Image (cartoon, rainbow, N blue to C red):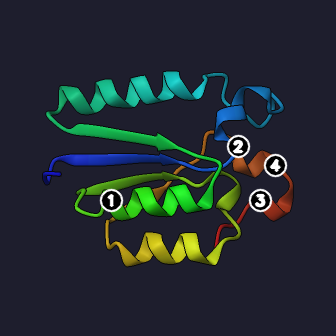
Amino acid sequence: MDSKTVLLLNGPNINLQRTWEPKISVATELDQVQKQVAGFMNDRGINLVTFQSNSERKLIHWLNEHHKASFLLLNPGEMTRTRDAFWDTVLDVGIPFIEIHLSYVSSSESFRHLSY
């Protein structure tokens, strides 16, 4: 994996995003978001590699396999507030990252406003 590779990792329940409440969710489905991000990256000569899983084990394994990427767009889904092993892996692989969300976090329940 070269230095011009960005990862887009989507965690648990992101595949169900379309079924969320409209007031807290963007209207676009995950595959459309991934296509838009891929187009944006491609226009800039950057390779985008995407992955989504509802399994913490699979997410950790995928991150370990792709540890040489240059950047990580992390949409942790239901792992936003929990799962020490997952977050330890995010930090341990050493890829610079930014946490993103497909929902309006501030419009959700107050316990969803923070990530750990």
Say few, some or many: other residues with alpha carbon within 10 Å of mark 2 (under 14 / 14 to 19 / 20 or more).
Answer: some
Whether label 3 touches label 4, CB < 8 Å: yes
The residues tagged by marks 3 and 2 sit, at their Cα atoms, a distance apart of 14 Å
Kind of residue at badge 4: Ser
Kind of residue at badge 3: Arg
Mark 2 vs mark 4: give the one in front. 2
Q: Dot 3: what SS? A: helix
Kind of residue at badge 2: Asn
| Marks 2 and 1, the one that precedes in the sequence | 2
Label 1, on which residue?
65
Residue 12: % across, % down: 66, 49
Label 2, on which residue?
13
| Marks 2 and 4, the one that precedes in the sequence | 2
Measured along the vertical axis of the image, is residue 71 above or below residue 101? below
Label 3, on which residue?
112
| Marks 3 and 2, the one that precedes in the sequence | 2
Say few, some or many: other residues with alpha carbon within 10 Å of mark 1 (under 14 / 14 to 19 / 20 or more).
Answer: few
Kind of residue at badge 1: Glu
Mark 3 vs mark 1: give the one in front. 1
Say few, some or many: other residues with alpha carbon within 10 Å of mark 3 (under 14 / 14 to 19 / 20 or more).
Answer: some
Residue at horizontal 23%, vertical 57%? 70
Q: Which mark is residue 4?
A: none
Residue 100: % across, % down: 53, 50
The residues tagged by marks 3 and 4 sit, at their Cα atoms, a distance apart of 6 Å
Label 4, on which residue?
108
